[in-house]
Amino acid sequence: MNTLKFTDNKQLISQLNSASLPADAVSAIAAIAASETTEIAVISALIQALSHHHPSVSAAAVKVLVKLAPATVEPLISAYYNSRDQGLQAYIIQALAQIGDRTASDLLAEVVGTEVANHCQGNVRRIAARGLGKIGSTTKDAKTIFGVVQKLTWALLTPEDWGLRYAAAVSLQEIATPEAHSALMTAFDREPDQVVRSRIATALEKILL
């Protein structure tokens, strides 16, 4: 039985790696999703697919990596640190943010705190902030929640990127601890952007409900 499973997975990897058309690669990824395999070799092939030149392939790979969590979390974190490809790193952050595993909280916090000069990387920071919101609102680990709220408070009060401050406000609303509420109260008095200020007000109303 184990040999058959390995052979099947080997075929799935071969099909994915040999796909010349985006549609073929997406089909191969769909086959992996249907098999629900969590073997390291298959996860590695999916992570490699995140670098595909066609966004539909990368998006399909993200979907399956999220589905196969938590087995994919550590390989994704490792792949992030072992790569200098910003496109690949962006998709990894997208996957980890959707998974919301507390193991990734340090990496997501690191990305939120990274100063960037371009809009695309700014989007990655916002996605990371939303991932922290998911982690902080689902984990029971007090230390993790504390660290997440600290980083989101910084993101709400410090950066010039209004989109990041907006994302931090939404995430703090999800976490809804007294510390998150306090951060939102402080930010409401300081926030210069009307759109973000309005979102902070909404967050405060939701937490009080």
Image: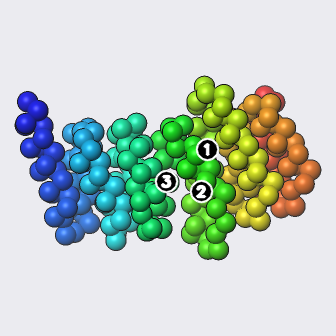
Helix or strand or loop: what does disc 2 sit on?
Answer: helix
Is the C terminus in the top left, top right, bottom left or bottom right quadrant? top right
- In the figure, 73 relative to 13: above or below? above
Residue ID at (41%, 51%): 78
The residue beneath circle 1 is: 132
In the rendering, at what x and y percent does residue 200 appear?
80, 47
The residue beneath circle 2 is: 111
The three-letter amino acid code for the residue at tag 2 is Val
Helix or strand or loop: what does disc 3 sit on?
Answer: helix
Outermost residue to the front: 82
Rate crowding at label 2 as few (under 14), some (14 to 19) or many (20 or more) other CA atoms within 10 Å. many
In the rendering, at what x and y percent does residue 186 appear?
88, 45
Q: Earlier in the sequence, mark 1 or mark 3?
A: 3
The residue beneath circle 3 is: 94
Count of number-bearing discs = 3
Residue 46 relative to residue 98: left or right: left
Give me the C-alpha separation between circle 3 and circle 2: 11 Å
Residue ID at (66%, 31%): 143
Q: Earlier in the sequence, mark 1 or mark 2?
A: 2
Is the N terminus in the top left, top right, bottom left or bottom right quadrant? top left
Outermost residue to the right: 189
Rate crowding at label 1 as few (under 14), some (14 to 19) or many (20 or more) other CA atoms within 10 Å. many
